[in-house]
Amino acid sequence: MDWLKFRKTDPTINARRESRIAQTLLAAAAITIAAPAFASAAPTKNYCTSVNGRTSSKGTAQCSSIPGGNWATARGDGARAYAGDGRGNRATANGDGSEAIAGG
């Protein structure tokens, strides 16, 4: 019982508890403020990824790569990326109409 009495009256324990409550409230406020921004961000409709010659795309983005550790990524309307003519090349095109070529 003495321990309970000590815990209730110890100012350091109360300060820690208040600090945790304040941290929780700040985190909740940050999430509340940031949530609408993340919710309104629409996913990219035009993307393409090609790794070692295997390509997956959606929309108008185009990309290609050849085997040998090559990787091409295009994001945006009409974006194009090519990675090849060597080993370990990486091409990344971000934005509408952008173009990237690596190793070729």
Image (tube, rainbow, N blue to C red):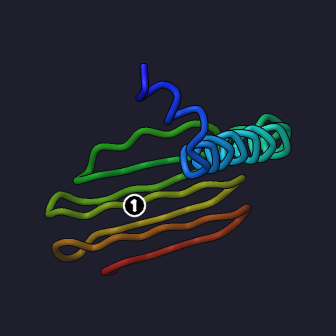
Q: Residue at x 79, y 34 (%)?
A: 39
Left or right, residue 55 beside residue 23: left
User: How many numbered marks, from 0 up?
Assistant: 1
Left or right, residue 55 beside residue 29: left
In the rendered image, the vertical position of residue 72 relative to residue 16, given as above or below: below
- Of the pair 65 and 49, the residue shown nearer to us: 49
Q: Quadrant of the N terminus?
A: top left
In the rendered image, the vertical position of residue 98 relative to residue 21, given as above or below: below
Residue 44: image location, x then y, percent: 67, 43
Residue 74: image location, x then y, percent: 54, 57
Q: Residue at x 72, y 53 (%)?
A: 77
- Of the pair 11 and 69, the residue shown nearer to us: 11
Left or right, residue 33 beside residue 71: right
Furthest-bottom residue in view? 103
Q: Residues within 10 Å of mark 1 (few under 14, many from 20)?
A: many
Q: Residue at x 60, y 38 (%)?
A: 9
Residue 96 image-quadrant placement: bottom right
Residue tagged 1: 72
Furthest-top residue in view? 1
Furthest-front residue in view? 2
Residue 38 image-quadrant placement: top right
Q: Quadrant of the C terminus?
A: bottom left
- Of the pair 55 and 95, the residue shown nearer to us: 95
- Of the pair 97 and 39, the residue shown nearer to us: 39
Q: Amino acid at mark 1?
A: Ala
Considering the numbered disc 1 on the image, is that residue within a helix, a strand or a loop?
strand
Residue 28: image location, x then y, percent: 74, 38
Left or right, residue 10 beside residue 34: left
